Image (cartoon, coloured by chain):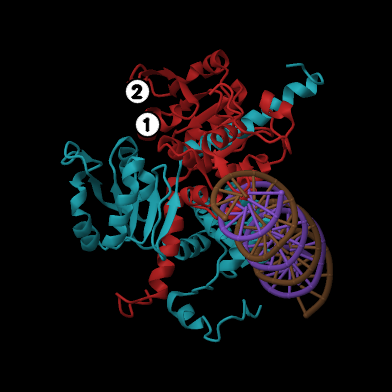
Chain colours: A red, B cyan, C brown, D purple
Amino acid sequence: MTSPRNARTETSATAADVATGKAPDRDIPEATVARLPVYLRALVNLSDRGTATCSSGELAAAAGVNSAKLRKDLSYLGSYGTRGVGYDVEYLRYQIAREIGVTQDWPVVIVGIGNLGHALANFSGFSSRGFRIVALLDADPRRQGESVGGLGIRPFEEVEVLVREHAVSIGVIATPAPAAQSVADRLVAAGVTSILNFAPTVLSVPEGVDVRKVDLSIELQILAYHEQRKSLAEPAELDGAVGA
Amino acid sequence: MTSPRNARTETSATAADVATGKAPDRDIPEATVARLPVYLRALVNLSDRGTATCSSGELAAAAGVNSAKLRKDLSYLGSYGTRGVGYDVEYLRYQIAREIGVTQDWPVVIVGIGNLGHALANFSGFSSRGFRIVALLDADPRRQGESVGGLGIRPFEEVEVLVREHAVSIGVIATPAPAAQSVADRLVAAGVTSILNFAPTVLSVPEGVDVRKVDLSIELQILAYHEQRKSLAEPAELDGAVGA
DNA sequence: TCCGGTTTGTTCTCGCGTTCACAAACTCTT
DNA sequence: AAGAGTTTGTGAACGCGAGAACAAACCGGA
C-alpha cells in the first residue's frame, strides 16, 4: 500500500495532509491515544478476515468499547469515514498506524534478561508492530553471551554505544526493582526518552522523558479488591464467616 | 469528625466496623483503588527501612503522587492518620492491605505456560503479596508434566477440578490470542470471577466477572506516539519550516 | 494551661472524559 | 430525481477525578 488514499473527500483535511502524512490535529486526548492501538488491532483482525469496510458499531464491538466513544476518538484524527457507509478498513488502519507512529520502525533495547526479559525478547507482538529489538542488556556476566531470540545478551556497560549506534529512543526495563532507577538514569543519559518499566518501583526521570509502568502484582491486587467486595456483598457460599 | 459519609445507607456501616476493626465505606473510587497497591508497596519499603511514622508528603513522594491526592485517597478508607504527626507506617500498611484484600491468601491459576507464563510462574511479586499460584495449566501435551517454580504443568482439561478444589476465583491468561476467549469462557464456567488477561485480545465475559488487561505492545505503541510527537516538534523549533 | 508549629481531613473549583442525541451526508431504490 | 434508510461527526450535558486551599486537630515547650 504505497498510496492508500482510496476515496477521500475534499471536505475537511487538506490535500497536503494526506500527501505528506501530516496529522491534522495536534492535540489528541491521552485517553484516546491509549485506545488507538486497540482500534488498530481490531482493524488488522478485520483486514485479515477480508473485511473491506466496517461501521463504527462493528469496530467498536471488536475493540470492546462504546460506538459513540469510538467515533469521537476517530474524529480527533480526522474525518476518515463515510456517512451512511462506514470506514474503509485498510484506509483507517493506515491512518491510525501513521498517527500512532508504527508505520516506521522503532528500535528498542531491553534491559534485564531474567524470566520476564526472556519472555519480552521472544514476544512476537513487538516485532510485528513496528518495534525492533536491537539489543538485550544485562549486568550479570553469567547471562552475557547467551542468545535469546537470535540476539545475544550484551553487558549493560555497552548501553551508551548501542543506544547511539541504533538511534534508540525507547527502552524497556525488566530488571529487579533495586536496579531499575539506576538503569533508567543511565538509559536517559544515553539518549533514551521513553521507558517501559516492568520493575515494581517508582521511577523518577527528567522532564521530557515518558515512562509507562506495567506492574503485574498491582493488577492482581486491584482484582483482589473487587473480588473481596463480591464475596462480602454476596456471602452465598460461606455462611457468616465474618470477623477475624 | 462525625462520619456522615455519603448518607446513603440507613444501615450504618458500624456493624462490620466493630468486627473487623474499622471496616470502611462502600464506595472507593476506581482511581483510588488503582493507587492503593502503590501506597502499600511504598509503606512496605518504609517499614523494611525501619521507618515508624511518615507524613503524607513523604509517602506521596515514595509513591510518586501528589500529597493532596494521597490524603484524599486515604480519606476514603477512614481517618488513619494523626494531625500534626502523620501516619503510623505499620498501622496504615495493615489497613490498606486489609482494604485491598491481601491480608488473606488468594489462590490463582495461570493458563498458558509459554515464555510469559514461565515468567509469571516464577514471579516472586505474586507470592509475596498474598497470591498463591495453585496450578499451571496448558493445553499443549508437550508442556504438561514439566515443572516450573516447583509446580507441575497440568492439562487444561483439569481446570474445573482444580478451580473447585482450591476455591480459585482469580485466573491469569497467558495464552496466544486465539485461545484466550475460549479459555476465559471455561475459567468463568468453572467459577473464576476475576481474570488478568495478557493475551492481546478483547475478552467478553458475563456480568459480574472482572477482567483486567495487560497488553505489552499497546504500552509500547503509546510510547511511540509520544516519541513521534517529540521528534516532530523538536527539529521544527530550531529552524522554522524545514522543507520536505 | 496556653501557644505556636505541624499535619491531616475535607471542601471547593476546574478540567477532562464519557455519553447522549441529532443534524449532516451518503447510498440505494423507485 | 427524490425519498427512505443508514451512518458519521459533533455539540452539549453530565459525572468523575485532580489539585489548591483551609479549618480542625494534635504535639511539644514554657
Residue A103 percent across, percent down from the top left: 55, 26
Visible residue check, residue B120 = no
Q: Quadrant of residue A166?
A: top right
Q: Amino acid at mark 2?
A: Val
Count neighbours of disc 2 (C-alpha within 10 A) and say few if under 14, some if 14 to 19, many if 20 or more.
some
The subunit letter for the residue under badge 1 reads A
Query: Considering the image in quadrants, where does the C terminus of chain B appear?
Result: top right
Query: Considering the image in quadrants, where does the N terminus of chain B appear?
Result: bottom right
Q: How many numbered marks does the figure carry?
A: 2
The subunit letter for the residue under badge 2 reads A
Say if labels 2 and 1 share a chain: yes
Q: Which residue is mark 2?
A: A148
Q: Quadrant of residue A155?
A: top left
Whether residue B11 is situated above or below residue A73 in the rendered picture: below
Q: Secondary structure at mark 1?
A: loop
Q: Which residue is mark 1?
A: A114
Give the numbered dot on residue B147: none
